Image (cartoon, rainbow, N blue to C red):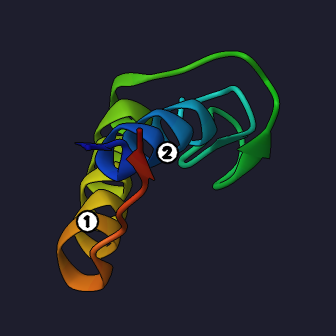
Amino acid sequence: MADWGPVIVAVVLFVLLTPGLLIQIPGRNRVVEFGNMQTSGASICVHAIIYFGLITIFLIAIGVHIYAG
């Protein structure tokens, strides 16, 4: 049986935390901007840290598993 939990969690978090798609922290003009479709180096670093923290919580601390087959 294949464990699809880590794959699904990683893809969903990647899509949701893409800087500028839904939210950008820090924004160019404000601290938080929504749906501006722009990015900066600082926002890439902040979103990467948030991504790492959330994926660590979901995969190691909670242990999300989805089995297929």
**Residue 67 point in image, percent of width and height:** 39, 52
- Residue furthest front in the image: 69
* Residue in the picture at 75% in, 37% down: 22
Report the side of 42 relative to 2 (left or right).
Answer: right
**Res. 59 image quadrant:** bottom left
**Residue 10 point in image, percent of width and height:** 38, 41
The disc at residue 59 is: 1
Question: In which quadrant of the rendered image does the C terminus lie?
Answer: top left
* Residue in the picture at 62% in, 32% down: 28
* Residue in the picture at 54% in, 20% down: 39
- Between 10 and 40, the one lying in front of the other is 10
| Badge 2 density bin: few <14, some 14–19, many ≥20, Cα 10 Å | some
Numbered label tally: 2
SS state under label 2 = helix
**Res. 15 image quadrant:** top right
The disc at residue 18 is: none
Separation (CA) of disc 2 from disc 1: 12 Å
Say which label, 2 or 1, has the lower sequence index: 2
Where does label 2 land, which residue?
13
- Between 58 and 40, the one lying in front of the other is 58
Report the side of 28 relative to 6 (left or right).
Answer: right
- Between 14 and 69, the one lying in front of the other is 69
**Residue 40 point in image, percent of width and height:** 45, 22
Report the side of 48 relative to 38 (left or right).
Answer: left
Badge 1 amino acid = Leu
